[in-house]
Amino acid sequence: MPFDRRSLCLLVAVFLSFFCAFSGAHAALAPKGNGYAYYAIGDLKAPTPGKVEPGAMLMGGGDWVDKAFAWLSAKAGHGHILILRASGAEDLQEDWYRRIGGVASVETIVFSARDASSNADLLARVRRADGIFLAGGDQSNYVRYWKGTPMQAALNDHVRAGKPIGGSSAGLAVLGAHVYGAMDGGSVTSPEALADPLGPAVTLVEDFLHLPFLAHVVTDTHFAARDRLGRLLAFIARERTEGDRAAIGIGVDERTALCIDGRGQGQVFTSRNGFAWVVTPAGQPAQAKAGQALGFADVRVVGVGPQSRLDLTNWHIEKPAFQAVARVDQGKLQLHGEQPVVLAIHGGAGVEKAGMTPQSEAQARAALELALRRGYEQLRQGRPAMDAVTAAITSLEDDPLFNAGRGAVFTHDGRNELDASVMDGATLAAGAVAGVHRVKNPVLLARAVMEHSSHVMLMGDGAEQFASEQGVSLVDPTYFRTERRWQELQQALKQENKQASALKEGLRHFGTVGAVARDDQGRLAAGTSTGGMTNKRYGRVGDSPVIGAGTYADVNCAVSGTGWGEYYLRVSAARDICMRMGREGASASEAGRAVINEEIPGMGGDGGAIVLGRDGEVALPFNTEGMYRGWVGADGVPHVAIYREDPLVLPAPSH
C-alpha cells in the first residue's frame, strides 16, 4: 500500500526520533534563519548529578585544554552545558560530550542576529543551563548581539546564581569588567595600541558581563603567541586614564586556561607550557593622550603557571612562574626582570688528583670559566635561564676534556653513545635524548624535543631523524673519536676479565656535564649531557637523560647530577632534592647533602650534583675526591674549583 505525504512525514519523524534516542543527538531546532541555530546532544531532561558551584574558566584560545573543561564540567555538577557562539555549528558540543565527557548534555546556540537575544526559548535555555561556555570567534559580535538585551541580563543572572561560566579567545575577551571589543572590525596589534592608546583602534566596552573577582580586569588572549603584552598595557592605560584608575590586566596564553573557583582561588591548566599573565601597574600612565604614544612605568608582570596559585581576593601569587617589570617609553615596550642572575655548572664528579697534571688542571679550569662566561652572556642579555643552560653545556660538550659531546667515551663495541636532557622549571617542560651517535651537541637536541615535539624522550635512530628535521647539527661518528678515550677503552678491555676494585668499578660510571641557572625573571632551568660509561654494553642508559634522576627543575629548584647513574635512577635523585626543598622547606645545601652525601652513599653509590634554589642559593655537593664545578653571578666573574679542598665561596641567597 503506497504512502501518502502525511504518512511519509510521520515515518521520517519516527526515524529521526529513534536515531536521536540511540545516538544522544538532537537535530537543530532552527539551523537557518530566526537569527540563530540550535543544536543539542545528550539527555536534556536528566537531573543534574552533582552540586553546581560558581567558577570562571579563562582560556586563551587554541586547542582545548581538557583538564580545564573537566574542571568546568565538575563546577556545573556534571549536568547541562550550554555553548554560545556567533559562528560555527555543533562541532564543539560533539567534542565536549563524546570525548571529554562527564556531562548529561551539551546544547549550542549559534547567534547570527541581535533579534535572537530576545527569543523566549533561548533565554529559557540559558536560565536552565548548569554551566555556560562562550566560544571563540569575533567578540564584537557578542557585544553587538547581546549588549542591552535580555540575553545580557540572563548571562549576568546565571553568574549571580552561582553557576560557572567560561570562555576561550573571543569568549574570554568579554568576561572581564572592561572588554576589548574590536568594534572597528579589526584586531589592534601591540605596536598600534602603544602608538595611540586613546585612539579609535582601542575600542573598549563597559558594563557588559559582571564576574566575581574581575571587577577591574581587562582580559586578553593568544597572549605570548601574538605578542599582546603591549596592547594589554594600552588597554589598561586607557582605562586608568578615562575611568577605572584601579584597572589591571590578565592575559592568557594559547592552550592554557586560568580557572577561578568561588573563593577566588585561581589555578592554571595548560597543554603547551603556557601561563596566565597578571599585569598590575604601580600607578597611572605618565603619558596617555589621544594621538600620542604611551608612556607607562613600573608595571608588574607576573606569570601564573601550573605550579602557581593566584588569590584574586588580594592578587597574591604563590610560586610565580616568573616576575618582571614592564616600562613603555614613547610607545616602545621594555620588559626586564629584577632577580640577580646565577649560573652553576659541573664537568663531572669522580676526579682524582692521581690522574691529573698541572696542565690538565689548568685546561679544566679554563674550560669551566669559558662555559660560565658563555652562559652568563645569555643571562646578561636578559635571555631565559634555558638559554644560559644550553650555552654552558654546549661549551662543555665541545671540549674533549669532558665526557660529553666531543669527549664522549667508547662503548664495549667501540662506539660513542650520547645522552642529554633539559628541563624548564617554570613550565615543567622537559626533553631528552638517549643513545645518539651523530648529534654534535645532544643538549640542543634535547631542547628541540622539549620545544618542538609532544614527547619527552627520543632515542637512537629516531632521535637522529628528528635532529635532521629540526636542523640540529649531525656529524660523522669519527668526530667523537679522541685518542685519550680510545685508550681508556683499550685499558678497560684488558682489565675486563680481571678482578677490579669496587672503587674502579664506581669510577667507570663518572663523567657528565651539567648546568643550572636562574634568569632575571626568576625562572629556573637545568640540563645534563654525557657520553655514558667506558666499555658499557647492551645499550645501557644511565641517569643523565632521565628526567627526575639526572635532571630536574621546578619553580623551587634546579638540579643536574653526575655520578653512578644506577643509584641516581633508583632514588630519582634530582627530583628527590627538589621535593625536599619544595615540600619540606630544606635549603639547597641541606637537600643536596641529604641525597648526595647520605642517601646515595648509603646504598653504595658515588657522585655529585649542582643544586640551585629559587632564592639563588647554590649548593655543589659531591662525595668523591673532586668534581669539576663552578658558578657565576650578576657580576659576571667566574668561580671554579676541582678538588674538595679548593676554596670556593658560594653566593648568598637572594630573593
Image (cartoon, grey):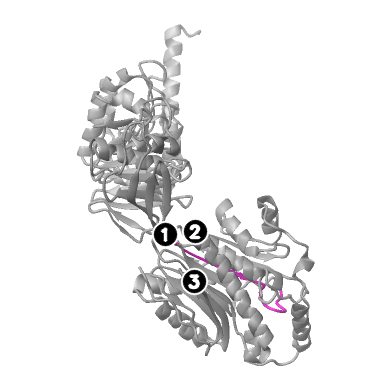
User: Magenta stretch?
Assistant: 520-538
> Is the residue under label 3 in contact with that under label 2 (CB below 8 Å)?
no
Type of amino acid at the residue the image marks with label 2: Pro
Type of amino acid at the residue the image marks with label 1: Gln
Measured in 3D between alpha carbons, the distance from the residue under mark 3 to the one under mark 1, in whole angstroms, is 18 Å
Name the residue that disc number 1 marks. 521
Q: Position of residue 544 (x, y in %)?
A: 58, 71
User: Residue 384 got which mark?
Assistant: 2
Provide the secondary structure element on which disc 3 rests.
strand
> Is the residue under label 1 in contact with that under label 2 (CB below 8 Å)?
yes
Q: Is residue 240 left or right of residue 3?
A: left
Name the residue that disc number 3 marks. 559
Provide the secondary structure element on which disc 2 rests.
loop
Q: Position of residue 563 (x, y in %)?
A: 58, 79
Type of amino acid at the residue the image marks with label 3: Val
Disc nearer the start of the sequence (3/1): 1
